[in-house]
Image (tube, grey):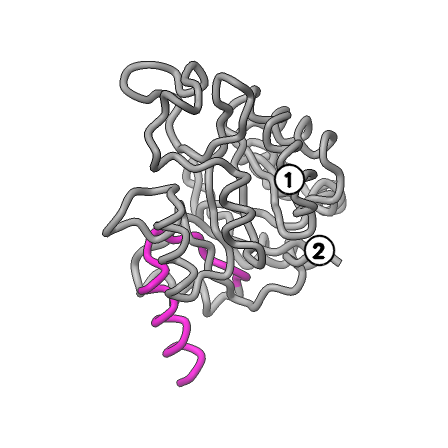
């Protein structure tokens, strides 16, 4: 059984860790997020020049593509995926594949650490996500936003069963509450997600009132920059 299916609901996914007093996507930021109650670390993967999976959000660093840097050339605060998986061996990771050269690097590292059951792979590129999960079967996955919008289109055209069939291949949908003027967490869409048996994670939520609103409609998790705040809101909301 994949660990994602055993997460508390709603869960807290720490967007690049808890980094307000450190640097995003660093071991320090991950550690602080876990300390404050994060259930999942959300992070971003590229590859170094040598083909090592590294955790960094942007494509560029100091005016140069991040994948052109060797490990020796990168600053110490940029962690490898291997270091993250070994430093936090019980933690779930949500990994956004940011570039095609990260596909193999991430897959090799996840397999090396036998971490398939605590990793979810996602990407804004459906091709990158598909390629990565082909290389490392057993990980969880969530669709690209474009794939999500297609399911909304099918449902709006009355092809509900087709939308559900598409969603059933995924473990979670990780979405903004609204995209291009479309409410992705409307009662209609929430019912479709439930029928498809996918988790619903909404990003990126830092406002306490918005957190409460999403909790009230039954989402399964929020992706947030403020794990500390989200944990307090979750605690008080469900203890009332």
Q: Please name the residue that numbered disc 2 is placed on.
A: 2
Q: Kindly identify the residue that appears in the image at 57 percent across and 55 percent down.
A: 89
Q: Kindly identify the residue that appears in the image at 57 percent across and 34 percent down.
A: 144
Q: Which mark is residue 218?
A: none
Q: Report the number of discs.
A: 2
Q: Is residue 220 magenta?
A: yes
Query: Does the rendering let one see residue 204?
Result: no
Secondary structure of residue under mark 2: loop
**In this view of the protein, which residue sits in the foreground, 237 or 35?**
35
Q: Is residue 163 magenta?
A: no
Q: CA distance from mark 1 to mark 2?
A: 14 Å
Q: Residue furthest bottom?
A: 240
Question: Is the residue 201 above or below the residue 99 in the image?
Answer: below
Q: Quadrant of residue 239?
A: bottom left
Secondary structure of residue under mark 1: helix
Q: Please name the residue that numbered disc 1 is placed on.
A: 110
Please give left or right for residue 227 compared with residue 158 in the image.
left
Magenta residue span = 219-240
| Residue 148 picture location, percent across and down | 58, 39
């Amino acid at each position: 059984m994949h660990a994602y299916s055993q997460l508390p609901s709603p869960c807290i996914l720490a967007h690049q860790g808890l980094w307000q007093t450190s640097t995003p996507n660093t071991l320090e930021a991950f550690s602080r997020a876990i300390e404050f109650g994060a259930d999942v670390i959300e992070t971003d993967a590229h590859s170094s020049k040598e083909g090592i999976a590294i955790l960094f959000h942007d494509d560029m660093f100091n005016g140069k593509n991040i994948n052109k840097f060797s490990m020796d050339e990168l600053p110490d605060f940029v962690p490898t995926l291997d270091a993250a998986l070994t430093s936090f061996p019980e933690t779930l990771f949500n990994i956004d594949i940011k570039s095609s050269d990260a596909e193999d690097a991430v897959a090799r590292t996840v397999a090396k650490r036998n971490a398939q059951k605590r990793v979810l792979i996602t990407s804004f590129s459906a091709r990158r996500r598909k390629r990565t999960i082909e290389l490392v079967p057993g990980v969880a996955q969530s669709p690209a936003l474009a794939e999500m919008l297609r399911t909304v289109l099918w449902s709006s055209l009355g092809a509900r069963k087709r939308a559900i069939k598409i969603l059933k291949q995924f473990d979670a949908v990780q979405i903004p509450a609204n995209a291009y003027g479309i409410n992705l967490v409307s009662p209609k869409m929430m019912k479709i997600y439930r029928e498809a048996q996918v988790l619903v994670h909404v990003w990126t939520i830092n406002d306490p009132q918005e957190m409460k609103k999403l909790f009230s409609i039954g989402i399964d998790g929020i992706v947030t920059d403020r794990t500390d705040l989200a944990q307090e809101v979750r605690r008080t909301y469900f203890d009332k």
